[in-house]
Image (cartoon, grey):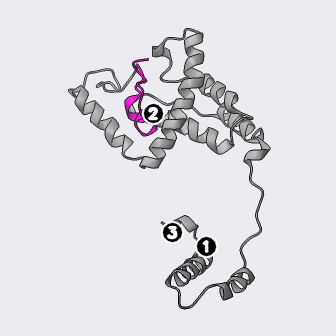
């Protein structure tokens, strides 16, 4: 579709456009003197509310939505104009298609991606309510058991004490690694917050 050009995941939220996009009208349907460029700037600024990594992740979710549900819509001959704003039943169907295959967090991310896509392009998002909550909760219960990591034994002071003799007081690398280890432990930080 011309609405979904081939592009990187990080560019999909911006470049993939719904047929129904932001219009320069007030709530009573009266025109507001804004150019198409002004309207595009609104979406661009809204897109900047998301970090680049989130844009890429959401781009992957949007791709999944397009490949599964948009193809379904193509098969059922549902016109592009009826695909956005997306109906609650369509999103529920999307979640249902992913249930039992993907982790609940992945499914939630994919739904958030479609929501962000709507918001960036000024398309109303009227999804929610008890039905949607029940479908998402059901998908979480159906998450594949392999996607749920078993709890690990926590790091304890005894472990650090046992490791200490293996670090050299004269090696800058050993000193840095041990400092990182103890800082992460006592600050209860993720290692990614302390390492490059």
Asked whether, in this view, residue 55 is left or right of residue 162, the answer is left
Q: Nearer the viewer, mark 1 or mark 2?
A: 1
Query: Residue 126 location, x and y as percent?
Result: 52, 30
Residue 80 percent coordinates (x, y): 47, 15
Disc number placed over residue 195 in the picture, else none: 3
Q: Position of residue 56 (x, y in %)?
A: 47, 42
Q: Earlier in the sequence, mark 1 or mark 2?
A: 2
Q: Which residue: 52% across, 37% down?
A: 60
Q: In front here: 159 or 24?
A: 159
Can you identify the residue that label 1 sits on? 188
Q: Quadrant of residue 190?
A: bottom right
Residue 46 percent coordinates (x, y) = 37, 41
Tag on residue 117?
A: 2
Choose mark 3 or mark 1, whichever is in front. Answer: 3
Give the main secondary structure, helix, strand or loop, of the magenta stretch.
loop
Quarter of image, res 33? top left
Q: Residue at x 76, y 64 (%)?
A: 152
Q: Residues within 10 Å of mark 1 (few under 14, many from 20)?
A: few
- Left or right, 56 with respect to 159, comes to left
Tell me if residue 78 comes above or below residue 56 in the rendering: above
Residue range of the region highlighted in magenta in the rendering: 1-20
Evaluate if marks 3 and 2 touch, with contact meaning CB atoms under 8 Å apart.
no
Please give the label number shown on residue 34. Answer: none
* Secondary structure state at the residue bearing disc 1: loop
Q: Is residue 4 magenta?
A: yes
Nearest to N terminus: mark 3 or mark 2: 2
In depth, the one of 124 and 173 nearer the eye is 173
């Amino acid at each position: 579709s011309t609405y979904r050009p081939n592009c990187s995941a990080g560019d999909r939220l911006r470049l993939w456009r719904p047929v129904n996009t932001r219009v320069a009208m007030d709530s009573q349907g009266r025109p507001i003197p804004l150019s198409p460029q002004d309207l595009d700037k609104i979406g661009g600024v809204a897109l900047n509310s998301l970090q680049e990594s989130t844009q890429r992740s959401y781009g992957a979710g949007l791709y999944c939505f397009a490949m599964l549900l948009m193809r379904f819509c193509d098969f059922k001959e549902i016109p592009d104009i009826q695909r956005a704003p997306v109906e609650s039943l369509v999103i529920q169907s999307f979640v249902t298609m992913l249930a039992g295959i993907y982790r609940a967090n992945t499914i939630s991310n994919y739904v958030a991606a479609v929501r962000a896509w709507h918001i960036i392009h000024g398309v109303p998002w009227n999804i929610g309510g008890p039905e949607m909550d029940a479908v998402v909760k059901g998908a979480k219960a159906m998450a594949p058991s392999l996607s749920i990591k078993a709890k690990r034994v926590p790091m304890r002071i005894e472990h650090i004490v046992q490791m200490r003799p293996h670090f050299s007081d004269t090696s800058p690398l050993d000193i840095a690694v041990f400092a990182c280890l103890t800082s992460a432990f006592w600050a209860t930080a993720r290692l990614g917050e302390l390492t490059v």
